[in-house]
Each structure stands twice: as C-alpha cells, then as structure tokens.
Amino acid sequence: MDPDRNEGAALDSWEEQADPGPGNHGDTVDIGSEFSALNVNAKPFVPNVNAPAFVPNFGNFTPKTEPCNNEDTEDKPSGQASPAQDSGIAETEDETTPQHPVPDASETPPPDQDGEAEPEEDEEEEELNSSPSSEEELGARAVTETVAQSSGKSSPSVAVKKPKKYEEEEEDKERKTEMEHVNVIFIGHVDAGKSTIGGHIMYLTGQVDKRTLEKYEREAKEKNRESWYLSWALDTNLEEREKGKTVEVGRANFETEKKHFTILDAPGHRSFVPNMICGAAQADLAVLVISARKGEFETGFERGGQTREHAMLAKTAGVKHLVVLINKMDDPTVEWSEERYELCKTKLVPFLKKNGFNPKKDVFFIPVSGITGANLKEKAGGVCPWYTGPAFIPYIDSLPSLGRKQDGPLRMPITDRFKDMGTILLGKIEGGKIKKGDSVLMMPNKTNVEILQILSDEDDTTEAKAGENVKLKVRGIEEDDVSPGFVLCEINSPCHTCKVFDAQILIAEHKSIICAGYGAVLHIHTAVEEVQITTLIALVDKKTGKTIKQRPRFIKQEQIAIARFECAGVLCMETFSDFQQMGRFTLRDEGKTIGFGKVLKLVN
C-alpha cells in the first residue's frame, strides 16, 4: 500500500487494502451487535398485493424522532444515518411485517444534526424520481419491506400525484374531434406568394415558432433568397427550396376558436397542374392568390396563365366558396393603392362569374401582404385605411358550416401510399366515418383491409369522420397492391366500378373540333386514367340545359355535350346525382385543361 496515498483516495484494487484483522478497529462497526438486533424468530414475509402504490421520496426526507436502541446508537459513528435515511426511501408498513417492542420514549436520544438530509440540494433529484416506472416501484418496495423487517422502523408515506399531462392531451383530442375540419387550398399563378402566405399564417397561429423562422431566414440569406424564408415552412423539399417552386401539394394545419383548418399549398407552375388537381379534389375552400405587382397580375390572368386555369379547376373539383387574396400590396409598384386593387377586382369578377361563381355570395376579396402579414390575422388599418372588411383568418373562421353527411357510407379515395412498419394510406374521407379496428373494403380489387391506426394531422385518434385528411396504418394489403384513385368503402356498401360511362362535358378551351375517337387524360377524384370518347350522344343548350341536337358529328369550344367514354382500366366512380365528390371529372390533353364534366350513367 502506498504510504503517500490520502486516506480518502480511491484504491486501485482490493489487494491494496490492509487487513484490519479481528476485533474493533476505529470506524468499523460491531457486526455482533448488529445481528443481535435481528428477530430471527420472525414469521416469513408475505407481500401485501393490495397495498397502495409506493412512491419513493428521495431527498426531502426529514428524520423522525423514534425510539431506538442505545447500543445501536453508540456503535454508529457520528454523522452516520440509519439505512432508511441514507437511501431516502419512504417505508410502507404492512400488517404482516413483524414489529419489535417499542422502548420507553425517554431513552430516545436527539437526532444527530449531521445525519439530516438537505432538502434544498435534492429538490431536482426528487422531481426526476417522482414518477418511477412500475419495475422501479416494485424494486424499491422490496428494499423498503426488507429494511422495515430488519430494523422495525417505519417512515411516513407520500401521496401519489397524478400528472396532468395525459389529462390535457385527452382534452385536446376531444376538442379537436368536436371542431369542424375545413380543408383550404391555396391556388394561383406561379410566384403569386401562395407558400409565403401559408407560412406566415402558420407563424401567426403558433404552428411555427420564431426561432425556426430565424433559422430559415439565415439559410435563405446564405442562398441570396431572403424573401423566401416564410415559404420554407411549407416547401420542405430541398428541390423546392432551391428553385423557389412548389412541386408537391404542401400540407400544414392551424386552429381557430371554432374550426380546425388544413392548408393545402398547390403548385402554381403549369408543369405540376396534375398535382394541383389532386389537391383540389380534397379541398372545401379555395383561396385564389393574385399578385398586385405591375406585370405579374397581367401575366397570370392572360390566356395561358395559371390564374384562369386554377380557378376553373377549383370550381370543377367542387369548391363552392372562393376567397381572392390580392397579394403584394406593399410592393413599391403598388404601395397599397386602392386603384390597383379595384383594377384587379374588376377584371376577375366577370371571369369568375363565367366559371360558375356567384360574385355576391361565393367570392370575397381581401388586400393582403404575405411578407408583412397585413390583413392576414389582424386588419392593417394604418397602411390600408380604405379597406373596411375583416382580415383573412377571422373571415374564414366566420363562414357557415359545410353541413357534411356523417351517416352515409364510407368513401375514402386514396391519394398516396407508402411503407413504414406496415402499409400506410393517405386520403380524405369524403363520406361516412372510420374507426380503429374496423374491417373495410378496398375497391376496385375487392380486398378486405383492417384499420390498425388512424392519424389525423399527425395526432393519433380512434375515429375520423367526413372532411378529415387522415393517415391510416392498415393490414391485409401491400403497398404495391394500392394505387392513387383506389377507394376504401364499407364492406356492405362498396362503391361502383366501371370502364364505360356516359357524362355531360363542357369544352372550355380547345383549338380544333372534337370527334368520336378523341383521346385525353381523365382526372376523377384522385384517380388519373386515359380515356377515349367513343360516341357523341347529344348537344345541350347552355341556358336551358335541354337537348338541342342528337348524334352530332363533332363538338367544339364553349359547347356542352353528352358523350360516352371508355377508360383504359377499371375506375371507382359514382354518378354525380348520387355522390358529387366521386362524380365530377376534368379532361386534360397536351398539358392543358380542355374540359370539365359530370358522370350521368354507369354503363359497364
């Protein structure tokens, strides 16, 4: 043993420790006196399974003045506490635990001040150990029973405090379930500011914190894209951030006092219109974003711009209410000019009326600024005194209820699928409701599927109803066996499938005439399929809706006709009169939208 080593220093091995030999040596405890205090004739210990839950109290332990044996007190050195005090474990008495006779209280010496625990130093340790797992509780209880049995002493028990975290989560889930779910799609020409407005709304409603936005701002500044940082809250793809163009339909959600909103950020570029159509099929409310900057409004609104096409597609997808946001009003070329605002409004109203919107009831105009957030959540009275209407978020929160039918059969078109510890399906419930553990039918391949998990806006729930965008974890089908356009239905009420159907179609934009044998791409709910016009049945008058000519040889732009279509594959659909969401469609050819229609009859 090293003579220079301090007495309190740790030893490298047990061999370095000197053997004290028999007898008492300084700080050593007389083992014989310790064993003499044990009750060797005690009954075997029987645990009480009905005892209250044990919660150890580490730290805030105040030694209780108890009768004890003078021999034990004299043998222990000064400053050494009892085993129960050292461990900080609250002992629990049991009826089956034997107790020693209690000596006279007059013989009890005062508790040693050095042996008291310091509650101030152990407050943090108490918080960390206040909610132990069940295994820790059982282990700690076993130690407590052993100490109590050997020493015959007991400590006060501590009341169990139930955490409020789980109660708050349950209340939050119930509140979200009771709220009406509204899906809002932001549409408009490329670079109109759709993603920027969506990102700013998420910040104003608390879905994105200030620190995250500051991080996005630094990263955007490094790439010389300072004005794009708000859009990065929705454009999470690296390709989208580098080019500044939305490719996929971005998703986010926010809440108001009355409703739960899901944001669908549609791409504005003409190359990604099919993605926009898929997003519009899930929308209840459309927000048409217009750039008031001189030159940008004219580019988007003229023939070939996405402002016109997106407005038509939104109406075809079943959107009944349209909010028009005149964005970039803070631009130096505009400077919140009322004249520029009225000019944009004057040009848009006739076009929207032509597409089926009622300007007085279905359309509402708001001047906003996506960068500054003016008129998004609060009115910008200082810079825009001439606007007297409400801000955007309060306005959509005050809209009347959509009145969905919750008691109808289940209909959920699939928008996407992937594999993550099982098959995951994404889509919007168009009708009925779905519960965890339900057995449903996947059409058109007629496969029984069991619902294992339901996620609504990334929150786990046991039930979802019409209008909600959900993510389902299912069993009974593989990812490769599902395609966008498949529909989840009730087993007793499956949806219809067909390849040949009759429909009424409006030719919105096409240079030449259309005859029998013409082929195009059909977009119906979330399905995309090639289709061919096999027969032109009749022409329909626009004003009266009556048939004016049977068996026309051709149809052209601005005409309405009834025609027979044949699909390349089997599609899930319903007639427009039975189920509107699965009975309306769009026709596209050569990257352009040429017409819209509704299904009248399922032939085969």
Image: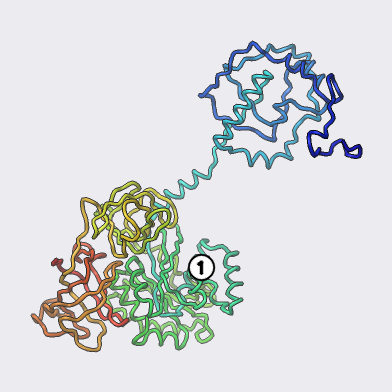
Q: Residue at x 66, y 25 (%)?
A: 155
Three-letter amino acid code of the residue under disc 1: Ala
Q: How is the image coloured?
A: rainbow
For the C terminus, which image quadrant?
bottom left
Residue 143 position within the rendered picture, expressed as x and y whole percent measured from the top left: 63, 27
Residue 263 position within the rendered picture, expressed as x and y whole percent measured from the top left: 42, 66
Q: Residue at x 50, y 44 (%)?
A: 166
- The one nearer the camera, 273 or 399, is 273
For the N terminus, which image quadrant?
top right
Q: Residue at x 41, y 67 (%)?
A: 264
Residue 406 position within the rendered picture, expressed as x and y whole percent measured from the top left: 28, 54
Q: Quadrant of residue 527?
A: bottom left
- The one nearer the camera, 485 or 524, is 485
Q: Quadrant of residue 59?
A: top right
Q: Residue at x 49, y 77 (%)?
A: 244
Horizontal placement of 190 versus 431: left or right?
right
Horizontal placement of 384 versus 103: left or right?
left
Q: Furthest residue to the front?
A: 15
Q: Furthest residue to the left?
A: 550
Residue 147 position within the rendered picture, expressed as x and y whole percent measured from the top left: 66, 23
Whether residue 403 appears in this view of the structure is no
Q: Relative to residue 308, is residue 27 depicted above or below?
A: above
Element on which disc 1 rests: helix
User: Neighbour class for label 1 at 10 Å: few (<14), some, many (≥20)?
Assistant: many
Whether residue 155 appears in this view of the structure is yes
**For the image shown, how many numbered marks are present on the structure?**
1
**Location of mark 1 (residue):** 233
